[in-house]
């Protein structure tokens, strides 16, 4: 409000800060041994998780990420707001053998998948396929007021990660076959 009154974009009071992710440890043995259930990492701080995850599930829904069921050698990440560039900047996340994205079944969800692939991350998706879309279509919202999805690049590292080269379309009814669910 003060910046607006001063007709400035910002006040310059705080320096920029690096992106941070929040995540949950899903490994049942880790939890049973009394290990932390929740943690965070900041890009550039060299933080290592309590164990090297074999599977990382990025969920756009915070509740889904923090309440994800136990899964051996896995971590769930709250994807809302941190973006693909932050994921690429955290080595243990970017190099996990299985990086899975579970986002919105709309143009924005597919835009997020495309952004991960643009950063060179071999992300795969779950429950973001044509069959799931058709089954739950009536319950899905395809628009978010006030935001226009970005155009997605059809060449986004698809070939290097075994994905089809079909473009992910930023439209009201996305082509779900463009983002494989494997």
Image: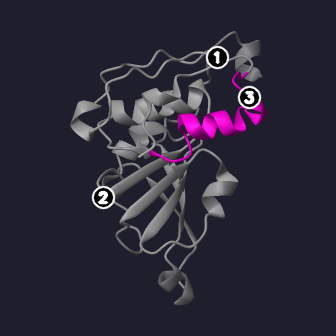
Residue at x 41%, y 74% (from the top left corner): 50
Q: Is residue 1 left or right of residue 35?
A: right
Residue at x 38%, y 74% (from the top left corner): 51
Of residues 71 and 135, the one nearer the viewer is 135
Task: Give the residue number, with chain letter if any, for mark 3.
Answer: 141
Residues drawn in magenta: 125-144
Disc 3 element? loop
Q: Is residue 161 above or below residue 49?
A: above
Sequence-wise, which precedes: disc 2 or disc 3? Answer: 2
| Distance CA(mark 3)–CA(mark 1) | 9 Å
Quadrant of the image occupied by residue 130: top right
| Distance CA(mark 1)–CA(mark 2) | 33 Å
Q: Which mark is residue 97?
A: 2
Residue at x 36%, y 56% (from the top left corner): 98
Quadrant of the image occupied by residue 36: bottom right
Sequence-wise, which precedes: disc 1 or disc 2? Answer: 2
């Amino acid at each position: 409000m003060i910046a607006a009154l001063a007709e400035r974009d910002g006040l310059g009071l705080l320096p920029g800060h690096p992106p941070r992710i929040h995540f949950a440890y899903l490994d049942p043995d880790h939890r049973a041994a009394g290990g932390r259930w929740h943690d965070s990492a900041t890009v550039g701080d060299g933080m290592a998780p309590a164990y090297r995850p074999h599977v990382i599930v990025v969920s756009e829904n915070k509740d889904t990420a923090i309440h994800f069921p136990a899964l051996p050698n896995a971590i769930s990440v709250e994807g809302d707001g941190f973006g693909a560039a932050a994921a690429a900047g955290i080595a243990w996340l970017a190099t996990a053998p299985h990086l899975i994205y579970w986002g919105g079944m709309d143009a924005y969800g597919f835009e997020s998948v495309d952004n991960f692939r643009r950063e060179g991350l071999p992300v795969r998706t779950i429950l973001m396929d044509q069959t799931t879309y058709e089954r739950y279509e009536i319950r899905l919202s395809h628009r978010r007021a006030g935001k226009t999805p970005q155009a997605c690049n059809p060449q986004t590292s698809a070939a290097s990660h075994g994905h089809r080269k079909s473009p992910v379309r930023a439209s009201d009814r996305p082509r779900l076959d463009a983002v494989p669910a494997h």
